[in-house]
Amino acid sequence: MPAPPVQIDRLTHRYGSRTALDNLSLTVPQGSFYGLLGPNGSGKTTLFRILATLLNPSEGAVRIFGADPRTHPARVRQHTGIVFQSVALDEELTVQENLRAHAALYGLQRSAFRERLARLLPLFGLEERLHERTGRLSGGLKRRVDLVRGLLHAPPLLLLDEPVIGLDPAARQTFREAIDRLRRQEGTTIVLATHLMEEADRCDQLAILDRGRVVAHGTPAALKQAIGEETLWIECDDPQDLAERIAKRFDVSTQVIGLRVQLSGPNAHDLLSPVYETAGDAIRSATIRRPTLEDVFMVHTGHGLHENGRPVS
């Protein structure tokens, strides 16, 4: 049986006294679109740096198609394409000059370079941009050029670290469509690190990270289904007291997350009226909704994925 694209076993990494990755284990299947969902500070970027041979872990094992990044970094780099948060392009050079320079780093011959350009530029709608100076391109176009850069050496594994941050909605959609075409036409295995739920929802498999640990794993649909068909969120000043009152009165499980009490079940909406009758004086607001990945994150961690609209650090 061939080795999986990514195999991680009990991976730990520390920066001095701070633990960035804590006994993390996961396997990325061949051909999958695998997501790592978590706030800033959850360990995603540290993990990507290890996978990209830029950082050696403190403990544990990593294999990329069976190769150890510590002992066989060149083999791992040949199998891996990387698109980091910041675009890795020289804005003074044209698109072609940027791509030619990157091809030289991987030892691509001129004929192989031309063949890859002929393959990738139409895939990402960049045929007419080859001779434009990169600095004049929009953010979305730069992202697509950066993606082509990461794919020039035809890697079977592509790492995407928050690739749509800073893009407007139209550019995000164009980038997503480009990734979908890449998967269909080249069968590339993709690992996406993100704190955006809408991006994570598009993945085949998802690992939710918090403080360097995998707290939940599965398909987005299965993760949401596991916490119930509906979720009832009640905000109040004393959530612990309210949770105890609800649990005692209705014989349901509750969870306190910040200033909210969470209840899940197939008919959570049926609880709303009797809960108000029992403890309406203590309730600020109540919301019923189908579970989201943010709900999954909160249930497994006890805190939110975002705070005031910004990633939690």
Image: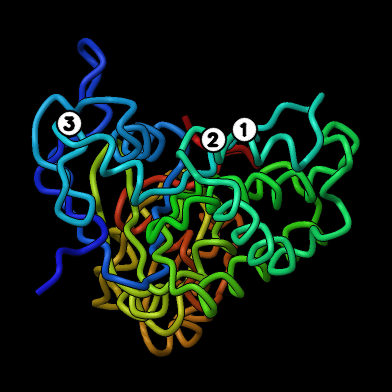
State the separation of the CA atoms marked 1 and 2: 5 Å
Q: Which residue is mark 1?
A: 101
- Mark 1 secondary-structure assignment: helix
How many tags in the picture?
3
Label 3 sits on what residue type?
Arg
Label 2 sits on what residue type?
Ala
- 226 horizontally vs 298: left or right: left
Q: Which residue is mark 2?
A: 104
Q: Which residue is mark 3?
A: 70
Q: Which quadrant of the view contains residue 173?
A: bottom right
Of the image marks 3 and 2, the number of the one nearer the N terminus: 3
> Would you place residue 9 above or below residue 268 in this image?
above
Kindly give the residue lying farthest to the top in the view shown: 16
Label 1 sits on what residue type?
Ala
| Closer to the camera in the image, 281 or 92 | 92
State the separation of the CA atoms marked 3 and 2: 23 Å
Question: Residue 299 shows which numbered tag?
Answer: none
Q: Which quadrant of the view contains residue 125?
A: bottom right
